Amino acid sequence: MLDQAAGRYQGEYILEVDHIVKEFPGVKALDGVELRLRPGSVHALMGENGAGKSTLMKIIAGVYTPDGGEVRFAGQPLAIKTPLDALNSGIAMIHQELNLMNWMTVAENIWIRREPKNRLGLIAHRKMREMTADLFARLNIRLDPDAQVSELTVAQKQMVEIARAVSYNSDVLIMDEPTSAITENEVEHLFAIIRDLKARGIGIVYITHKMNELFEIADEFTVFRDGKYVGTHASKDVTRDDIIRMMVGREITEMFPKVECPIGETVLEVRNLTLPGVFQEVSFSVRSGEILGIAGLVGSKRSNVAEAIFGVHPAPFGDVLIDGRNVQITCPSDAMRHGMAFLTEDRKETGCFLILNCLENIQSALITQGHVKRGFIDQKSVTAKAEEMARLLRVKTPDLLEKVENLSGGNQQKLLIARWLLTNPRILILDEPTRGIDVGAKSEIHRLITNLAVQGVAVVMISSEMPEVLGMSDRIMVMHEGRVSGFLDRAEADQVKIMSLAAQ
Amino acid sequence: MTDAIVTATPRRRASVSELNILLVLVAICAVFEMLGWITQGQSFLMNWQRLSIMILQVSVVGIIAIGVTQVIISGGIDLSSGSIVGATAMIAMSLAQASGYERAVYPALTGLPVLIPVAVGLLAGLIAGTINGALIAYTKIPPFIATLGMMVTARGFAKWYTKGQPISFPSDAYAWIGKGMHPVMIFIIVAAIFYVVLKYTRYGKFTYAIGANPQAARVSGINVEKQLVKIYAVAGLLSALAGIVVSSRGLTAQAGMGTMYELDAIAMAVIGGVSLTGGRGTILGTCIGMVIFGVIISGFTFLRLDAYYQEMIKGVIIVAAVVADVYRQKKRSKKA
């Protein structure tokens, strides 16, 4: 039953998007974009964050309705008003956010709304399990159909999503950054699945940030910029730089504008920091003006070390010294008193107050440090400071009273940096400062970090992006499973050395 | 396809939550049994009369709790059940009065076949529930507010209906509905039906799906709005059923009937392991929660504890159940 339906269409394009327009209050998210998908091909959709890729996909999948333009499916105009319409038309989508139902089993998640029934009209759980097992066998996924989704790892959840999308036997499959949560091995697995689907004549739209994926899997690609269509090419005809140019509309000559600057005294020193069961005997020091990069694979507990130092989850053993003096940090406000600032890994979950406006977000750390007159916040002074900082960091928003959830990832990150800079930190801990941020904003944030180092701030930067760690750091500390596995100087560090320390 | 990727198989998790709740029930019974022998010199459990009264006392609210269970699983809450009990009791009773009764609400409509008051009562509950559901699904106001509005409105309606006068003298057929152990039987039938519905039908799967992740439910093609309306309509219907049973049993309907039933019903569900965050809970759990609730009340009476203490302790138990739920979730997320 899994082989029926898909891949019947013989025309040139299975899915055609013509002049789609979509406006949100204050923003034109899509301005007449185009996309042409051939059956049996993988079409990558590229663009910076905020280019409108996900918006278009949500229109095709029936989550949003367009304000203008036309979507044609197998040559016929398509009127999709709900996700159900899309699924019925033969379009399935893997959403960027994981869209699974916790507390339900893997099988229930995959077959929801399509559960097999027995003669009494009741759901046949055994049949559903078998169908799931068949599907998994076909896709080489090894997962218990009866496992509860809440018990799965993020990567396993992603595989369930992929399996569910495939199970619809649709002619068009949309994948919105399907590899953002999975490891190298699983990416290979996913690509194998994609090649198989392609061979069956299914058209796949593949949204990604990752250049190497594009060259490995995509036949063609289309680039959007700021909600506008830029162009479509066959991937074999272009180079990496061509695509970057199309995406940003400008040359990025210096990805990592590291400036050599004098390095001063040791500001932060950590000795034998241990959180039993998480990380052991972590020791390092950072000097003023220095950027210490922390590299490591997922599970190396780098973020836990940062959280321990900043007092989010303090470590019971070991010492933290600031300017050579032993300090006790049991909560973040202790850390702030000692001149620390911490940009967390997940800006949406633990960084921004999404439903508050930009000003409120910038001010939140500042107002814990005074700026109070007779019990009330000194609005004039904090607003002036926040506005100045937002201007300095070039936060792009029509209005600082805009809710932060409406900003792009890069601008949210800038806001968070602005928040912490207002506290005049001497030690800045950054956890994945450019994750999920587009190329342009990335280099701006790198420039900011460098400038701070020049001004004498001691920077600790956790990053999973090898080029970022190599490009930005004066020294690199590599962690492996909760332990420091080595240090590398800027001059000697390269990808191979880092990897061999990180993977051991 | 050649690449076989070993994706570790997570441990299958047995549904132990009902078992846990059952253990709590056993423990509570054991405590009362022990206290019974110590303070009263007699057994708490070995007394059929006490047990049957106990189950009878909670079965009417139990019917409501079944409806409330599916509402909470969907991530919502229903505060209007108690008021719907009052309103539907009044409506049904006004059409169920014995023939020839002179001071009937509708003197021309006495001695009707019992089907009519029952059908009209159920319909009234269904309508009230549908209004709840439509408000929640289409205006996107929080369930708390929508059903709070219905709670006040339905109670007002019940008072207005006869300007505060009670309605009495039902026909024999109507009085039969709530006689003897009938409320318990009605509860068992309702519970059995919804046990199957939640476990073996799409209605059930959709309810869990919406509670677990409404966005995921929507992109899976579920019409979330329609399903929400159904869920609240069913809750209203079951409240109406409870209203009919309680008025039949009491041989009278009063505007104040069912006051606080909504909270008792929510408490039964929560004690039974239905998570207020949605997506988790079972009918079986709620049934055990109902029995725990009954045992505690009847246990306190048995120990001759003041009724005022009973209420206070009831409150403590509800909060303790929610704390236990939060604690369970925390433990699980730590493990993951």
Image: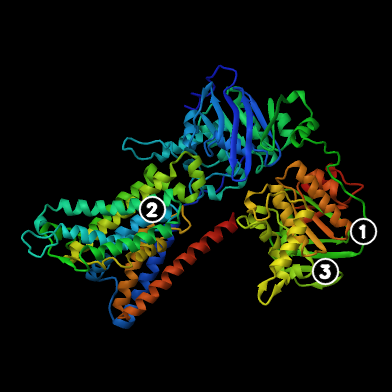
What's the residue type where badge 2 is placed?
A: Gln
| Image height of B2 relative to B19, above or below | above
The colour scheme is: rainbow
Residue visible at 79% across and 28% down in the picture: A239
Residue farthest front in this picture = A380
Q: Which residue is mark 2?
A: B70
Q: Is residue B90 visible?
A: yes
Q: CA distance from mark 1 to mark 2?
A: 63 Å
The image position of residue B50, as x and y in percent, is: 25, 71
Chain designation of label 1: A
Q: Is residue A141 visible?
A: no
Mark before the other along the chain sequence, 3 or 1: 1
How packed mark 3 is, by other alpha carbons closer than 10 Å (few <14, some 14-19, many 20 or more), is some
How packed mark 1 is, by other alpha carbons closer than 10 Å (few <14, some 14-19, many 20 or more), is some
The image position of residue B132, as x and y in percent, is: 37, 54
The image position of residue A464, as x and y in percent, is: 75, 47
For label 2, the SS is: helix
Whether residue B36 sits left or right of residue A334 in the image: it is left
* A3 or A9: nearer the viewer: A9
Residue visible at 77% across and 58% down in the picture: A389
Chain designation of label 3: A
Q: Which residue is mark 1?
A: A263
Residue visible at 69% across and 28% down in the picture: A221
Residue farthest right in this picture = A262
Q: Are marks 1 and 2 in contact (CB under 8 Å)?
A: no
The image position of residue B232, as x and y in percent, is: 36, 52
Q: Which residue is mark 3?
A: A321
Q: CA distance from mark 3 to mark 2?
A: 55 Å
How packed mark 2 is, by other alpha carbons closer than 10 Å (few <14, some 14-19, many 20 or more), is many
| Image height of A147 relative to A333, above or below | above
| Image height of A104 relative to B20, above or below | above
